[in-house]
Structures are given as C-alpha cells and as structure tokens.
C-alpha cells in the first residue's frame, strides 16, 4: 500500500481507510483547525514536466499554509533534463534537496518509477493519461461536503475515454457502498473496455446513456469533463455534439434539488456560465478544495 | 525411394527438452530464453509435430544448458502446458510442468507507447498477474495472457 510507504501514487492502490483519513484531515484544515506550522522547516520539491496551473499552485499554496517551503523545478528547458538527464537521475538528485517531491510528468507510470528511486516521499501530481490522485481526492472531498459517500448515483459526462480524472474517480468510488455510475459519452469516447471490466469486477454498477436527460432526475452528482476537439472521432460532428452536451439552467430543472455539478476545470463550453450562479454549481468550490486536500496529502506523507 | 537415415529430432546427451509447447509458440520460447543468432548452444526447434496426446505441438531442445526456474516460468507465458525435462547422459533426471509466474520483470514490452518503461529510463518492465492477463505495474495496461502476450516478448 503506497500510503504506508509514504507515497501517494494512485487511488487504485489506496484503501478506503487511507482515503477517509486524508479527507477527514482535509476537513480539519478546511475548517481552520490547523496550526499553520505542521511542516515548519520542510521543503517540497515541485517537479512539473508539463504545464499546470491549478495543481502546481494549489500544492504550493498547501505547502506554504502548513509552514513549509517550495523548491520549484522551473522550466524544463533550463534544466539538466534538457541536456538528456533521465527522470530517475533527476529524482535521485532532488531527493537530497527536499523532504518530499510532487511530480507531474507526461509519461504514465512516471510517479511510480520516481517512488522507486526516491529517498523521500513522492506524490503523483498527474502522469500522462494515467493517475491523478490529488484531483480524485478533492473530487471525493467536494462530494463528501455535500452528501455521504454512499448510496450515490453519479453521472460522468464528456470524454470518458481519455479523461484520467473520471477513471480515477470511478475507481475511488468503487471502494464505497451502493455507488451507481451513469456514463454519458459520445460514441468512441466512452470508458475503455478494460476499465469497464475492472469496475465490473469491483462490483460497480455501470449504466450507459446516450443523453444526460435519461438519468439526470436520478443523479446526486453530475461530473462534467471537457470534450477535446482533437480527441473527437469525427471532428465535423464536434460542434453539434458540444452543443448537445451543454449543461444549461433549463436542463437542470429536471434534476433533484440537492444534486451538485462538478467539473475538474478548465471548462470550455460544456457548462453554460449561467449555471455558475445556481446552488448546484460546485466546481469553483471544488477547485478551492484542492488546497485543504493537498495540505492533508502533504501532511500525510511528511508528518513524523 | 528409401527414407533418409537421420532422425528428424536427435536426442541430446545433456541439456533441456521443452515439450508440449503450444503450436506456433516454439520460436517465441527461443526468444524468451534469449537465444539469439550468436548462440553457442545447439538448439533444435520442431514446429507442429504430432503429439502423443493427440493434436499438434512445438518442441525445443537445447544442448548443454539446463534451464533454471525463472526461465522455466517465463515459458509459461506463451506455453502454459509445456513440460521441461532436464537431460543428463541421455537420461531424464528431472521433469516438471511450467508454472504461470505471479510477476514477470524485464521480459514483456509494455504495449502502451506512453508508458515510462518505453523511454530511455533504466527500468525493466514489470507485469503482475491479473484476472484478465498481466498488468503493467507502471501504467496499468493489461495484456491478455491467452492472445496478446507473445507479441510483446
């Protein structure tokens, strides 16, 4: 189990107790119950080999709110990586500079490789189309702030084939009781067959829909992801599809009154900006929750 | 016309006989064992021969090399019904079935081009047995044991 080894690499290998412990710690930090000195004197190396705004900034903010300091990789072009150094060597060296490493890398499995050569804890800040556990934990946290993480009907809409956030979230939800996952995706962008088989083995009830209206009245959570034009099997059909998949206040009239709408952001056209003012719109709160959740993750791997 | 007076597959004095290999996988077994063009061993491969159990099989004989357990288990990836006989002085001194390994390192190439193991990183691939095949420990890609695995060895 990776949390015991003081790494957080994937929700796939986290137990439910580990997730719950991190979410409860996040709630404490969120309610202002931290001292602000939990990680005094500690240094977090932030190694991002890919562009990122929210993840990088919220990890940095979380570390500073715990009293720790940040060591940034800076731009990849200006480092020894540009000279051809391997990730393994970079991680070995940086292990001597910091007390923990948060890594984002374009290759899947990069964080696991890093954890095998690092002498300090590694947190996966997203690896290619693979895992992004901090996003999943903040998604779960946002749901848990609105309802218990059991007996939930959750709709996942958008690019479910390549969207790593929905894959990780589906896995994490499989650890909770009575979760029904409704998928709403264009043809060709549904969950990969191997993921469906994995979820089915884990006992998750998966229900596929062509349109969100089919399941919206049953949903407790609607999780919307961005459709990327380049990933669309038929680019000509993208525009008509994007408008069909748009969440509007009118559409949400058939939803339960306490249903919440989430989105990992950035959004483009998939949620009408008029939805922002509705009580169900939780996506900005979800982004803000990245700080307390990442505080809890940093505390988990670096506390004594 | 008289038949040629040579055996199709000669017995070996010392070495290993891998029998009951799934038809078509004999050459993959050779590849798994790392036997390449420059080998000094005498290697015999017979493909699609009749099996005494009925049907067809491939067969590999390697002179002067006794396979160790790790090598034997790797063979199970493509030939789960294979048997391994260790030969000394033309006698079978040990005969064992192959066992499907729980974990396999450095043998299978990950089919996911974006996997970290398909880069210049000095890391051997690692696959763990899973209900539907072998799962890459790095990127979670699953290779089906029955159909695909030989393509990635």
Image: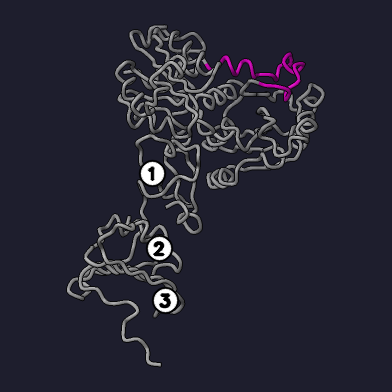
How far from the left and from the top, in percent, is residue B36? 33, 57
How far from the left and from the top, in percent, is residue B30? 36, 61
Q: Which residue is drawn at 23% across and 63% down?
A: B65
Disc 1 is attached to a residue of which chain?
A: B
Label 3 crowd (10 A; few <14 / some 14-19 / many >=20): few
Q: Are marks 2 and 3 in contact (CB under 8 Å)?
A: no
How far from the left and from the top, in percent, is residue A43? 36, 12
For this orientation, the residue located farthest to the bottom is: B1
Query: Image quadrant of residue B52?
Result: bottom left
How far from the left and from the top, in percent, is residue A197? 56, 47
Which residue carries the number 1 mark?
A: B126
Query: Image quadrant of residue B33?
Result: bottom left
Q: Give the range drawn in magenta.
A: A267-290
**Which numbered disc flags the more N-terminal residue, 2 or 1?**
2
Q: Are marks 3 and 1 on the same chain?
A: yes
Q: Looking at the image, is mark 3 or mark 1 nearer the viewer? A: 3
Name the element at disc 1: strand
Q: How far apart are marks 2 and 1 (CA)?
A: 23 Å
Q: Residue at x 48, y 32 (%)?
A: A107
Q: Reply yes or no: does residue B147 show up in magenta.
A: no
Which residue carries the number 2 mark?
A: B27
């Amino acid at each position: 189990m990776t949390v015991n080894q003081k790494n957080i690499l994937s929700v796939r290998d986290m137990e439910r107790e580990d997730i719950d412990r991190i979410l409860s710690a996040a709630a404490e930090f969120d309610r202002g119950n931290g001292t602000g000195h939990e990680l005094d004197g500690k240094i977090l190396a932030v190694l991002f080999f890919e562009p990122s705004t929210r993840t990088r900034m919220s990890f940095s903010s979380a570390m500073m709110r715990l009293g720790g300091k940040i060591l940034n990789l800076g731009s990849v072009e200006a480092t020894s990586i540009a000279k051809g150094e391997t990730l393994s060597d970079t991680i070995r060296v940086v292990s001597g500079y910091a007390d923990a490493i948060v890594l984002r890398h374009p290759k899947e499995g990069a964080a696991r490789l890093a954890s095998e050569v690092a002498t300090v804890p590694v947190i996966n800040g997203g690896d290619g189309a693979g895992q992004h556990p901090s996003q999943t934990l903040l998604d779960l946290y946002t749901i848990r702030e609105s309802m218990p993480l059991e007996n939930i009907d959750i709709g996942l809409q958008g690019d479910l084939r390549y969207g790593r956030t929905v894959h990780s979230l589906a896995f994490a939800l499989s650890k909770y009781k009575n979760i029904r996952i409704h998928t709403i995706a264009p043809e060709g962008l549904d969950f990969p067959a191997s993921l469906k088989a994995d979820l089915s083995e884990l006992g998750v009830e998966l229900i596929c829909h062509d349109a969100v209206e089919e399941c919206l009245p049953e949903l407790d959570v609607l999780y919307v992801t961005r459709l990327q034009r380049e990933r669309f099997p038929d680019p000509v059909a993208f525009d008509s599809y994007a408008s069909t998949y748009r969440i509007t206040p009118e559409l949400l009239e058939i939803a339960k009154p306490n249903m919440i709408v989430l989105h990992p952001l950035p959004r483009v056209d998939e949620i009408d900006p008029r939805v922002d003012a509705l009580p169900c719109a939780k996506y900005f709160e979800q982004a803000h929750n990245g700080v307390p959740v990442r505080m809890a993750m940093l505390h988990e791997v670096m506390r004594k | 016309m008289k038949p040629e007076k040579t055996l199709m597959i000669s017995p070996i004095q010392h070495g290993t006989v891998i029998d009951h290999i799934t038809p078509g996988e004999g050459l993959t077994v050779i590849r798994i064992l790392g036997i390449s063009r420059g080998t000094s061993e005498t290697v015999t491969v017979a493909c699609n021969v009749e099996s005494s159990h009925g049907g067809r099989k491939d067969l590999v004989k390697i002179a002067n090399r006794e396979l160790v357990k790790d090598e034997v288990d790797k063979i199970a990836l493509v030939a789960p019904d294979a048997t391994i006989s260790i030969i000394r002085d033309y006698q079978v001194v040990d005969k064992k079935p192959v066992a499907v390994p729980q974990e396999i390192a450095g043998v299978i190439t990950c089919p996911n081009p974006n996997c970290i193991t398909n880069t210049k990183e000095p890391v051997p691939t690692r696959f763990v047995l899973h209900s539907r095949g072998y799962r890459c420990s790095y990127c979670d890609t699953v290779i089906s044991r029955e159909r695909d695995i030989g393509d990635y060895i």
